[in-house]
Amino acid sequence: MSWALEYLWSPFIDYGFMRRGLAGTLALAFAAGPLGVFLVLRRMSLMGDAMAHAILPGVAVGFLTAGLSIGAMTVGGMITGIVVAMLAGLVARLTPLREDASFASFYLISLGLGVLLVSLRGSNMDLIHVLFGTVLGLDDAALLLVTASATVTLPALALIYRPLVLECLDPSFLRAERGKGSLVHMLFLLLLVMTLVSGFQVLGTLMVVGIMMLPATAARFWARTAGRQMVLAAVLGSVSGYVGLLISFYIDAPASSAIILSAGCVYVFSLLAGPYGGLFQAARQAYARRRRLTQTLTP
Amino acid sequence: MVVRLKSRNCVLRAWQLVAVVCLVMYASFALAVTSDQTVKPMPVVASFSVLGDMVAEIGGDFVQLTNIIGLGGDAHAFEPTPEHVRALAQAKVLVVNGLDFEAWLPRLVAAANFKGLQIVASQGIEPRQLDSDSTHFDHGHSHAATEKPAGPHAGLHAGEVDPHAWQSLTNGMTYARNIAAGLSKADPANAATYAARAERYIEEMKKLDIQVRHALGQIPPEKRKVVVPHDSLGYFGREYGIELIPIAGISSQAETSARNVAAIIDQIRKVGGAAVFLEGTANPKLAEQIARETGATVGGTLYADTLGEPDQPAGTYLGMFKWNAGQLIYALSPTR
């Protein structure tokens, strides 16, 4: 027993970089999981990916002006992320174009601009490092940023929880009740951008979407209500982060991809075994229905 | 009337002919004069900044140099632009490192329809084999890793060599000789100049080599341990007996694992007093974390795949070498 505990805890006791990586991943998972649940509810699961790309030009401007400084890249990323989200939302409200389509257009423009800006310096080297963060090399500033953003995100989500669920499920009802639907939506987008920008310090812009969406989609198979799904998504994300770091420690795999792949395994397992709409469950129900049918037809 | 017109036409023609002949004669005369007085420099393309500096040292004013990868760029992750294709199409000589360093080059050469002379600068050096024990984190290694033969040696990374051969002055001398020989072949008229300039350049390298060896001789061999961001200074370590512990593999793109970082930290804790270095093109965060955790000193920035800005100490090949050696010696000196 103590041997197993040793196996599971000693890497985090012996090495500071493992503790930092775990702390950063936990903070990120707790903020990103619930946000992911709302994205799934809104049927905008791919929007996280789009937003993660959309912040690139701001990050690039921050990088070009101040080097690898967290403050500049964060501010730049926040600004472009919010601008893209606002523009896409505006276009969706004012024109017949749907929100996902306008998001796609604006994020592509933004991504193109970002690659152009990074390449202007004659090097696409550092872009790679921006896209794939270093979970093993978190310094104090990055840790503070992630934890601070999670600390803001969770209470804010709790505050706007009810109108947000309404806005996701029945926007016309909320409008009829004179709810501030668009304000709530904008606040949600703000939280989303903040979490993504802080997350690219930990896992990188591409991987942070994984820790946001995979636990959320997995939680969908285990819980019915949005609230339970949010709690479960946060827990599943944290477990994936912990397991991923351990895998990276013991079997010599790159850390951030190990974390995302653990989350992927959790998702596949939930897809198969989840009690709400999981494949085994569906198969069993189909089998039971057929048996009932044959029993009633052949008395 | 008709006859008169015709005759006038004939006269006009004759004048035109004279004018054209004069013009042609003048033009050819002028051309001959210019080619006699000012020699047009030979267009040479070098694949990256280190080779470019060597070509400039040896070729001097007789070559017109273009570097494909400019300063600060990383040769591992590089995308050529149309400008590079144009420069290469007009070039007479292309200087490359070889040893699979420029994986993107064959396509570029084909695209530019380059027909000139290709100098492989690393020809004749003793390549450093990458042993799979210490440096097996080459997931992102774009050169040979994907095309490994599935033969009996496949598991041993057969044929994978470290391309960063210029990080040893002995090899640098070979580079200089190869470049001088190639330039002489492409431009025989100035062969003597190239040879003389190369000889002078090699003399400088020899002097620096002796200096570095002397300075490193003061440091006990068991203390010569440093951590570097990626495995790019292997030739330097082999030449001068320094043990280099790379965080990532040979390519700067690979992401390292927690186990590797933990192994490095253990190693430093055991030895004590090792130094952690940063690199111009790599993310410094991981190196800083390792230094924080072990209390090792953070050394300065080392230059591996690229030179520094022209006005900086590491702006030339020799300057870069002097800078790297100075940083290493300073960090390892027992008096600190």
Image (cartoon, coloured by chain):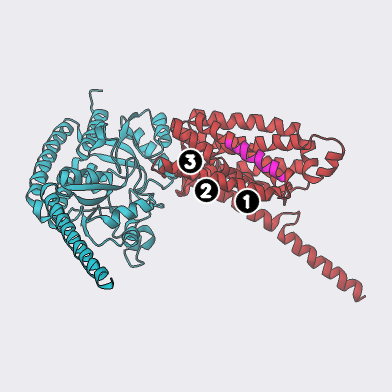
The residue labelled by disc 1 is A266
Q: Is residue A83 magenta?
A: yes
Disc 2: which residue:
A258
Label 2 residue SS: helix
Residue drawn at x 50%, y 39% is A135
* B30 w.r.t. B304: above or below: below
Q: Is residue A30 visible?
A: no
Looking at the rendering, in which quadrant would you find the N terminus of chain B?
Answer: bottom left
Most extreme residue toward the front, as rendered?
B1
In the rendered image of the structure, the colour used to display chain A is red
The cyan chain is B
Q: Pick the quarter of the image with the C terminus of chain B.
A: top left
Secondary structure character of the magenta stretch overall? helix
The chain holding disc 1 is A
Q: Which residue is mark 3?
A: A130
Amino acid at circle 3: Val
Marks 1 and 3, how far apart at CA: 27 Å
Tag 1: residue type?
A: Val
* Residue sitting at the far right: A299
Q: Which residues are magenta?
A: A80-92
Image height check: is B150 above or below B123? Answer: below
Q: Position of residue B284 (x, y in %)?
A: 40, 35
Give the residue at x 52% y 47%: A112
Specify whether residue B316 is in view.
yes
